[in-house]
Amino acid sequence: MDFVAGEILLIDKPLTWTSFQAVNKIRHHLKRKTGVKNIKVGHAGTLDPLATGLLIICTGKKTKEIDSLMGLDKTYSGTIRVGATTPSFDLETEIDQTFELNHLTEEMLVEAARKLTGEYDQMPPIFSAKRVDGKRAYDLARAGKDVILKPKKILVSEFLITGIALPDIHFKITCSKGTYIRSIANDFGLILKCGGHLTALRRTAIGNFQVAHAVTPEIFVDSLTENSD
């Protein structure tokens, strides 16, 4: 592989890793492999630390394709836990409210998913990397400061309920760039009037790129060593 001329790498980001950590690890080892200190390495769409799955990393001249890759639709699988909410809409923060679930039916769950399918304005989570007056929203939220964000138009082309084991709802979602699955989990709970937050998320595809063809950062780094033997 010619990393300086440019390669598109499919990486399976581990749980708790930031996207930057994955890029940084790969950049560090590519510098050693190629001997090029300023080799270009970047990712085409971040994943939250609590999410796993497909991270596209571009090297060399392929970094020029990052913007077009970021515009591709994303597909996720995951779990929404109904009956409780958190300020971050996921497990980063503690539960702040709980609700009864006795009124829920399978038809209500499917209908809620249908209502969140299509094009609409989505409000990002205050615990997000959005910038507010030059600062990250999550830094302001963690400091207990008010965070005012603007909604963004998104497109959810598919929202399927793939399993029900209350309080957990398993799903598959295909959506446009910039969609927050955490916000979908929160909105799902609002529609059902029982609260909801994201407990698991895995990105399985970006456009036609599949996580099935991806490797972990450690396996990729090991392959560099093997190929240099």
Image: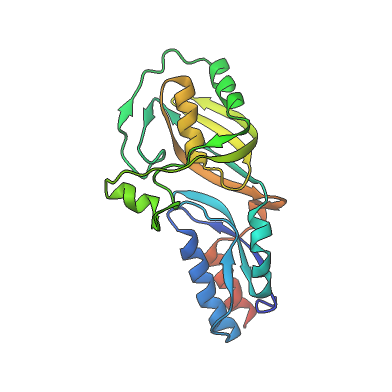
The quadrant of the image that shows the N terminus is bottom right
Q: How many marks?
A: 0
Kindly give the residue lying farthest to the right in the view shown.
Answer: 208
Q: Residue furthest left?
A: 144
Residue at (56% x, 35% y) in the render: 121
The answer to whether 173 is drawn above or below residue 3 in the figure is above
**Residue 174 percent across, percent down from the top left:** 64, 40
Which sits in the foreground, 147 or 163? Answer: 147
Q: Position of residue 191 (x, y in %)?
A: 49, 22
Of 225 and 56, nearer the camera is 56
Q: Is residue 147 left or right of residue 226?
A: left
Q: 144 and 107: which one is in front?
A: 144
In percent of the image, x 70 and y 50: which residue is there?
Answer: 207
Q: Is residue 196 above or below residue 214?
A: above
Tell me if 30 is positioned left or right of 103 in this view.
right
Q: Quadrant of the C terminus?
A: bottom right
Answer with left or right where residue 125 lies relative to residue 26: left
Q: Is residue 72 visible?
A: yes
**Residue 80 visible to an observer of this rendering:** no
Q: Position of residue 132 (x, y in %)?
A: 40, 52
Task: Residue at the far front: name it.
Answer: 133
Residue 116: image quadrant is top right
Up/down of 170 relative to 110, above or below: below
Residue positioned most to the top: 103
The residue located at (62%, 32%) in the rendering is 159
How is the model colour-coded? rainbow
